[in-house]
Image (spheres, rainbow, N blue to C red):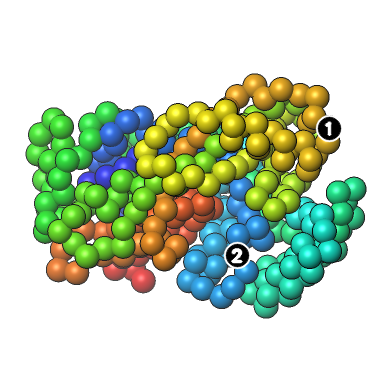
Amino acid sequence: MIVVGAGIIGLACAWRLARCKIKVIVFDQGEAGGEASWAGAGMLAPGGEMDEASPLTQMAMCALAMYPAFVESLCAASGVAIDYQRCGAIEVARSDAEAEALKQRAARQAALGIRSERASHTAGVALFYPDDALVNPRDIMAALRIACARSGVVIREREPVAEIFRDGTGVRTSAGVYRDDGVLLAAGAWSSDLIPDFAVTKTKPVRGHLIAYRAEAGMLRTILRGGHTYLLQRDTGTLIAGTSTEHVGFDRTIDENIVEDIRERASSLMPALAGLDPVERWNGFRPGIEGGVPMIGKLENTRIWTAFGHYRNGILLAPDTARRIEELVTGAT
């Protein structure tokens, strides 16, 4: 199997397929995990994203339930320690209108199995989502690289795929032609451009900025959200604030005005940050997709499988996506 894309989706799928004794080679135009998987904050938080019944909500809930075992098996396979915290999340409403909207959303979510309860917070009315969690995506990627290598997966970095053969029997890269009995397309925001002859849902980059503070470990013990702002803290003490939503193509420029806006919002949500300067700022390209539902499946009459378009939830959905791809490829549904 040829996998196009070495982000969290591509490598999670590659690792799972390799454990089924399938020979796997992965290509990426840059470094493995160097795009959205590197840039993501790592929230595993259906409570902050989902509030209606949909295939995406079902995937998210399934993936969240899979995460403890996913992390445990990945740690065992790689020897890498992974910062995974089932810490819950507090969602703050700072006006009567926001409080009413939060109350109504909680009622819709309860019907979906997303638990929440009233909480107190200095900034206003709040809900606590006990099942939301976080993980460090950079830990996950470091572990996946090692686990894949130990399972026999070959990862070819900085070798972009220029063409996927229409029947799925191989690819052409910057270095030559590779043949195999199937191709899995998991190239994030670049995916639909690699299969222009197929009527597939189009992908697009959605840029988002994040900033990080150096803070005392344990300063923030849950995810903290308010409106379009969130805060979370790694076990190392690094405290991350985000984010923005920008439709600017593949422009990697750091916009200092956006950075300052995130800083102001973060300080408003957590006043203890007001006197701190960010020690890091970065952005990444979320793999947006029309309709908002990832394209996970097989292109008709081909040997091309697809796993792309996860937008904000690629880190969360990785274990469930890998399970689905394994079942599709092996027929073990």
Residue 110 at what x, y percent from top left?
Answer: 71, 74
Q: Which structural element holds mark 1?
A: helix
Q: Amino acid at mark 1?
A: Ala
The quarter of the image holding the C terminus is bottom left
* Label annotation for residue 93: none
Q: What residue is drawn where x is 83% and y is 32%? A: 272
* Residue 36 percent coordinates (x, y): 45, 40
* Residue kind at label 2, given as amino acid type: Met
Q: Which quadrant of the structure image shows residue 280?
A: top right
What residue is rendered at 49% in x and 66% in y? 56
Pick out the residue farthest to the front.
257
The relative height of residue 316 versus residue 5 in the rendered view (above or below) is: below
Q: Residues within 10 Å of mark 1 (few under 14, many from 20)?
A: few
| Lower sequence index among marks 2 and 1 | 2
Residue occupied by mark 1: 272
**Residue 78 shows up from this direction:** no
In this orientation, which residue lies closer to the viewer: 296 or 254?
254
Left or right: residue 318 versus residue 300 is right
Residues 188 and 271: in front is: 271
* Residue at x-position 31% and y-position 62%: 201
Q: Is residue 261 visible?
A: yes
Residue for point 59% across, 32% down: 257
Name the side, left or right, on which 156 lies relative to 240.
left
- Horizontal and vertical percent position of residue 6: 35, 40
Circle 2 residues within 10 Å: few <14, some 14–19, many ≥20: some
Residue position marked by numbered label 2 in the rendering? 50
What's the CA distance linking mark 2 and mark 1? 29 Å
